[in-house]
Amino acid sequence: MNDITIKKLSEEVIVSKEIRDWPIWEKEISRFDWIYEGDEECLILEGKVNIETDDGIYNIKAGDFVTFKKGLKCIWDVKSPIKKYYNFP
């Protein structure tokens, strides 16, 4: 089961999904446990983070569009301050 998907979006898709109207979340360099209680989509604007899961480590950086699935248990290891648009579809 793939609990995390990472892809790049074209400007056209960013506009059509109205991503720039989504709320923004920011986090300093840190490390913390997280459990997703629902699906989340996000577009990383700044920073780098390693998401540690039972399936491995996902390296996420600025420009990535990431989907986290409900039920995912992971560790966020923020390597440089993160800024992202996020949405719970």
Image: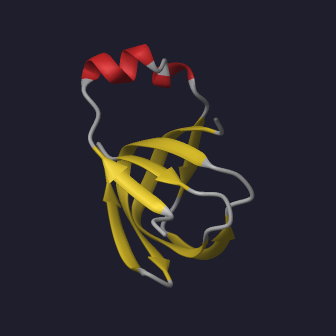
Question: x and y percent of residue 52 in the render?
Answer: 47, 78
**What colouring does the structure picture have?**
secondary structure
Asked if residue 13 is positioned above or below residue 42 in the image, the reply reads: above
Residue 9 is drawn in which quadrant? top left
Question: x and y percent of residue 28 in the render?
Answer: 52, 60
Asked if residue 83 is positioned above or below residue 54 in the image, the reply reads: above
Q: Residue at x 64, y 35 (%)?
A: 89
Q: Residue at x 47, y 45 (%)?
A: 83
Q: Is residue 10 left or right of residue 42?
A: left
Q: Is residue 8 left or right of residue 4?
A: left
Residue 33 is drawn in which quadrant? bottom right
Question: x and y percent of residue 67 in the render?
Answer: 48, 50
The residue sitting at the front extreme is 1
Q: Residue at x 36, y 70 (%)?
A: 58
Q: Residue at x 65, y 39 (%)?
A: 88
Question: x and y percent of residue 80 in the render?
Answer: 38, 62
